[in-house]
Image: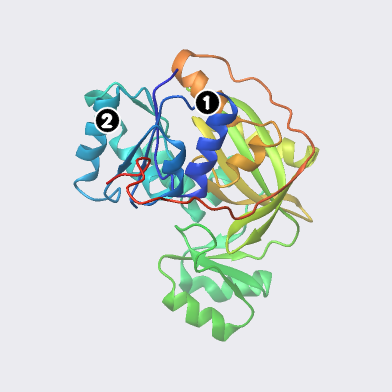
Amino acid sequence: MPKLLVTGVGSNIGQGILKSLAAAGLDGDVVGTDVFQFAAGFAWCQAAYQVPFANAPEYAPRLIDILRRHGTQLVLIGSEAETWELSKLKARLERETSAKIVVNGPELIGRMSDKWGVAELFREAGLNYPKSIIDMGKRRELVAQLGYPLILKPRRGWSARAVQKIEDDESLDFYAKHTPEPILQEYLEGDEFTCAVVFDRDGNYCDHVVMRRDLLSGTTFRAEIVARPDIDEYVVSFARKLRAVASINLQLRVTKRGPVCFEINPRFSGTTAMRMKAGFNDVAAVVRNFLDGTPIGKQPAQRKRILRFWDEVVIEPDDPRFPK
């Protein structure tokens, strides 16, 4: 049984990783970490540790101690903040422990975590990308070109935080001034899709799945596996020009000029467990590939609708599943 560590087990990403491991029978020796003592995912781990925030000086020494204590082979990242920090810490952690960190390099993480970087990646690939500016002094020029509405949001962020649909000059001027590191983009009409794209440990594109989704408070609560040849061609064309590892997530809309990606999450995503329920278990495929080189084959996802709902974990006094 592989010795694994999953971070951020209080998040839907971390819990999706845990559920996917369990579905594949790979959950026999899993350590969980989270910044909160009472993270629901601890209930499904064999050992549980509360850790500092990823950008704290104490984070790396704490994680190194846990990895050494358990002889961890592979670290799977379940939170946005840790994706960036563990990308920078990867070399140190792998040098000082027996663990491999499943994460892309800092340069690629930086570009994929930046809305402007995403637009540039697709432009460089010769594919559709959202018309964008980051120089707010040129905002009137974009309005003259595209008209309203437009989308204004921080270049770096997730879960639709601080995303504004701009309808007029007054709103544009206000949010351009009060949004940190703003990017102004064309408003993309059309259905929204989320696409998990899977690469092997050597950076080769292997597989992907396409889901139409509905959002609630910035996260997917309803999704449907769909067959869309136009999206398939767009995603594969991009993926074959990218040298990434493990699973990343493309968010796009299908417009009059075809699919247009507006965001990349360079990690396992919040829909990890949802696509696993349809037979697309990218977590298990990545774990086996990273551990012993098992090739990542195609996993034709079943045409299903998946609905997300709240559930509860009950914690008794002195519950041994949770860190003290």
Pick whichever, 315 or 18, lies toward us: 315
Dots 1, 2 in contact, CB < 8 A = no
- Residue that label 1 marks: 286
SS state under label 2: helix
Q: Position of residue 282 (x, y in %)?
A: 59, 30
Q: Determine whether, in the image, residue 21 is placed left or right of residue 7.
A: right
- Residue that label 2 marks: 93
- At 24% from the left and 44% from the top, the residue drawn is 59
Distance Cα–Cα, label 1 vs label 2:
19 Å
Residue 127 appears in the rendering = no
SS state under label 1: helix
Would you place residue 6 above or below residue 253 in this image? above
Q: Determine whether, in the image, residue 171 is placed left or right of residue 309.
A: left
Pick whichever, 101 or 157, lies toward us: 101
Which of marks 2 and 1 precedes in the sequence? 2
Q: Position of residue 307 (x, y in %)?
A: 70, 50
Quarter of the rendering containing residue 191: bottom right
Residue lying at the far front of the rendered structure: 317
Q: Position of residue 105 (x, y in %)?
A: 39, 35
Classed neighbour count for the residue bearing mark 1: other residues with Cα under 10 Å, few (<14), some (14–19), many (≥20): many
* Mark 2: amino acid: Leu
- At 62% from the left and 39% from the top, the residue drawn is 196
Coloring applied to the structure: rainbow
- At 47% from the left and 71% from the top, the residue drawn is 136
* Mark 1: amino acid: Val
- At 43% from the left and 47% from the top, the residue drawn is 79
Would you place residue 171 above or below residue 242 in this image? below
Q: Quadrant of the N terminus?
A: top left
